[in-house]
Image: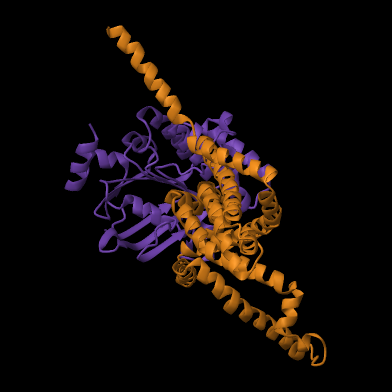
Chain colours: A orange, B purple
Amino acid sequence: MKSDDSTFVPHQSQLSATLSEVPWWLLVVMLVGLIMVYNITTNEDYSSIFSFLKNGVFITVRVTITAYIFAVIIGLLAGLGRVSKNPIIYNIATLYVQIMRGIPILVTILYVSFVLYPMIIDGVAWVAQSIAVIGLGDSEGFWANITASDINRMMGGAEYSMLYRGIMALALSYGSFSAEIFRAGIESIEKGQMEAARSLGMSYIQAMRYIILPQAIRRVLPPLGNDFIAMLKESSLVSVLGVRDITQLGKLYSARSFLYLETYNQVAFLYLTMTILLSLGVRALENRLKSGQ
Amino acid sequence: MDKKTHDLTRGEKEKIIVIRNLNKYFGELKAVSNVNLEIKRGQVVVIIGPSGSGKSTLLRCINHLEEPTTGDILIDGVKLRHKSKSLNAIRREVGMVFQQFNLFPHLTVLENITIAQKIVRKRSKKDAIEIARQQLERVGIPEKENSYPIQLSGGQQQRVAIARALAMSPKVMLFDEPTSALDPEMINEVLDVMLDLAKEGMTMVVVTHEMGFARNAADRIIFMDYGAIIEDTTPNKLYNNPKHERTKLFLSKILH
């Protein structure tokens, strides 16, 4: 009896352990994906929606990657500002982070696009005029009479202009999130590291550059990766500017064809495919970093 | 506590560290209280005292890892000022070894020892590596140059930390309880390296409870309590004839 129990019980717990290790959620997603691919290849509505939406994938990816690169650069600078002992630098960085975190991203997108961006363009035009007239003594030439709309045209016209505005807004918003990630990463490095570097005669900047940041960046790679995924999803908000990303094209197509279910199924699934692939990548990165150090 | 028990009148050049009227507060807490101290080139000074007596803080003030509240510190005749560019220049002349080793975990042993040589001393990569290898030889672990700190034992890590500080060719070495975080069987390998260094004539200031080291290597021993220097004498005199009650009490607790 006893020996029966002891052989039977582990066997069952092993089976249930194996079953609980199967990533069922991923299988469900893959099944839905297969159905989606099947529909796209066999159903005419689905396939015409897909060929319309796929142009938006490029825009979505472009907005996400460009905005993300700027967000990380802004975030690194603001994060360094947040750990700075210089009160001016600290307060500027903190003000930026608090403002950006306190405003909904959609509002930031509208504000940047229709308030900040026009102001910047006006400013650039004014500076160009001033340089031409005062600096070069030329009040007749092209630069002396340049206007904001000229600059807008040089930047690629209305279509690109909105793309840039969206990218700028997302970069400013996400810059504040990455700033906090960098700050936490830098603060997680033991105090002794900075002390050892300074005691060897390194300046604060050298110690940051060679000792603190290389360690901090390793630690923040997974959260930064998660930010990239969040950015990919949030990039759909630029559709309010008319930027022709996946969401905007979905809106256009469904409004025209009334195929709401079919269109938004595919819109959602396109995002889901990208985010799940990316999150698996982030998880792999996390595991590699864990085993690496 | 301005009493000088040592003859330090052999000329200013001999004094590599001069501390005048040093006070350090942490908020309300007075960690270092009116310390005056002069250390000559080549001297080995051991600082002992109960925990919280300000000995580590005093040591950390010497290279301005702690900013003194009042008072002056001169290294080789140069006054230290906080947040000045010259501070980095002085710090490279003062090597420091920490209780927690503080090796750079993302760098190999060799890189740990070469990085500051390259970016602070501006040595060529080749020279830096050559010096690093000499120092690793000196501390007895030349075979570990490509290891990462995490792959080393505590004693080995501390020896790398000593090599890292020595590679900067410092004029003074500060040791902040260098063996306190080590397993007992690893203490001697670190103390041996320090003893050799003392014999070679390095100026050393060592905060430690290792009385054996103090007896064998120290020219001077300083007993601190409540942030002040209570006694400043030779090891022999301190052991055989402590002047103050507090010193006696402390010694009776640590000498078994």
Quadrant (top left/top right/bottom left/bottom right) for the N terminus of chain B: bottom left
Residue A124 in the image: x percent, y percent?
68, 80
Image quadrant in which you'd find residue A148:
bottom right
Total marks drawn? 0
Residue A85 visible somewhere in the drawing: yes
Residue A97, placed above or below residue B210: below
Front-most of residues B82 and A276: A276
Residue B254, placed above or below residue B125: above
Residue B128 in the image: x percent, y percent?
64, 44
Residue located farthest toward the right when viewing the structure as drawn: A141
Q: Residue at x 75, y 77 (%)?
A: A153
Residue A252 in the image: x percent, y percent?
64, 64
Front-most of residues A213 and A26: A26
Quadrant (top left/top right/bottom left/bottom right) for the C terminus of chain B: top left
Front-most of residues B122 and A105: A105
Apparent side of residue A147 relative to residue A116 in the rendered image (left or right): right
Residue A200 visible somewhere in the drawing: no
Residue A250 in the image: x percent, y percent?
62, 59
Q: Residue at x 66, y 50 (%)?
A: A46
Apparent side of residue A181 relative to residue A132 in the rendered image (left or right): left
Front-most of residues A71 and A32: A32
Residue B101, placed above or below residue A167: above
